[in-house]
Image (spheres, rainbow, N blue to C red):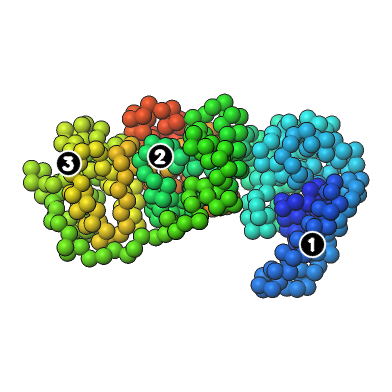
Amino acid sequence: MHHMIVGVVGAGAMGRGIAQVSAAAGHDVVLFDSNADAVTSGLDAISASLGRAAERGRITADAAAATVARISGVDAIERLAGAELVIEAIVERLDVKRSVFAQLEAVVGPDTILASNTSSLSIASIASAVQRRTRLIGLHFFNPVPAMALVEVVGTPYSADAVLERAKAWVAGIGKTAVVVRDSPGFLVNLAGRAYATEALAILQDGIASVEQIDRIATANLGFPLGPFELMDLTGLDINYTVTANLYEHNFGDPRLRSTWYHRYLFDAGLLGRKTGRGFHDYAGPDATAEQPAPTAVSSVRAIGVALAGDNREALSSLCARAGIPVVAANEADLVLIAPWGSDASASAARLGLDPLRTVALDLLVAEPSVHTVMVPPGVDAEAVHALAERLRGIGGVEVIRDSPGFIAQRLLAAIVNLAADVAQRGIASPGDIDTAVTLGLRYPHGPLEWADRVGLHTITAILAGMHETTADQRYTTSAWLRRRANAGLSALTPDFS
């Protein structure tokens, strides 16, 4: 991309981050804010940020100085007249943004690209304030801008293809990855990212496991850098509750985006997470999410024998062998082990004709999990469950949870995949771009559709079918887009016919 003059409106955290990465890529930047003090503070923050980068050896002192020199702070919007691209990063109010773009249109040239960094407002609604709507698009950066590699390039029915192509080239030129997405509530990343949090909230509301258990299983077994509750606490419930509620409303009550009363309760109580010292976790007390102690010897644990039933008996047998758990005939067993997909232990026992008071379930979603999840129905002998758990601790961590359809890891992953499939179904982005955006924008260990391929589409659809059958909740209706690919034996990354 050729050298450009880039205008940035808004000198807050996002605006100054966009100004910094633009100038670092060699563009001249004009930074405007209606508050002159904000411009001064923004320039100081950029200079400090680049200074720290130079001290850490990430850039040279000369490069830092040159970047700062390419940014000019101005106190009048008219000073943006020469810009070829203007990016707005101001308060998330539709009326204010419309007013700013109407002013910009009167100032800049006819070929200048106008872009909003909004994360929650419709780009088409903002574009209604200007005459040349073909040139107004979304450029949604992620915070902190210098560190995050993704930019969502948001097109509307008005957007000219040439404008979107110029924007993509500019994004690539500043060292970011551009993903073109359709203008829709939450765009791509904010929408696709709802499943992780809302499914964790549903698990908590169902009384299946504690906040700490859910976070531990999500990080240890699924590989997330933070558990869902740790992540919500870090982001702040003032942000994530509001975004979740808005997306639920703007998607006309889509059950896959539904939050819970407890989420709202903490928000109303001002228990917003790390910023207030307490949210889902209490940050004034001991670290409840700390790793479990290393496995210990189990020679003194009560002897226990188990029988195996249902599907996945071969995998259960391998697990028992590693843990030193004898597999015996059903009539001699203390417990009967099963490994269902999307079903609870009680329903599975009834379907298989097993004694529900001796049946417990193990989650085999991950072949060799760091934490073994043991699902226990009511009425099962506690001493036998304790003996089983102690044997499993010889080969890893253990979390014992209440009887429930889908365990924890199964539910989280199936919800993530199902929502990503619906994003593809809606045409918000291509399957490959969905995975790129989620891994770069949310830092998931895998893209959701690639993840579905790794686990197996039939496994994901089986989990969802079991959840739906057990709960009758439309939240677990399998995406038709996903089911088509499972039935055809195709990859989840297969695009629709065109």
At 10% from the left and 49% from the top, the residue drawn is: 328
Cβ–Cβ under 8 Å for marks 2 and 1: no
Which of these two is toward me, 92 or 498?
92
Q: Is residue 353 left or right of residue 278?
A: left
At 75% from the left and 46% from the top, the residue drawn is: 89
Ranked by sequence position, the earlier of labels 1 and 3 is 1
Give the residue type that dot 1 points to: Asp
Name the disc covering residue 44, or none: 1
At 20% from the left and 38% from the top, the residue drawn is: 379
Q: Is residue 255 left or right of residue 8?
A: left
Q: Mark 3: give few (<14), some (14-19) or many (20+) Cα within 10 Å.
A: many
Ranked by sequence position, the earlier of labels 3 and 2 is 2
Which of these two is toward me, 42 or 186?
42
Quadrant of the rendering where the C terminus is positioned: top right
How far apart in space, not on screen, are marks 1 and 3 (Cα)?
Answer: 66 Å
Give the residue type that dot 2 points to: Ile
Residue 247 position in % (x across, y down): 59, 34
Name the disc covering residue 358, or none: 3
Ranked by sequence position, the earlier of labels 2 and 1 is 1
Q: Is residue 347 left or right of residue 88?
A: left
Q: Regarding mark 1 in the picture, which secondary structure is present there?
A: helix
How far apart in space, not on screen, are marks 2 and 1 (Cα)?
Answer: 45 Å
Q: Specify the quadrant of the image occupied by residue 52.
A: bottom right
Task: Please say if 344 is above or below 285.
Answer: above
| Residue 28 in view, yes or no | no
Q: Which residue is mark 2?
A: 203
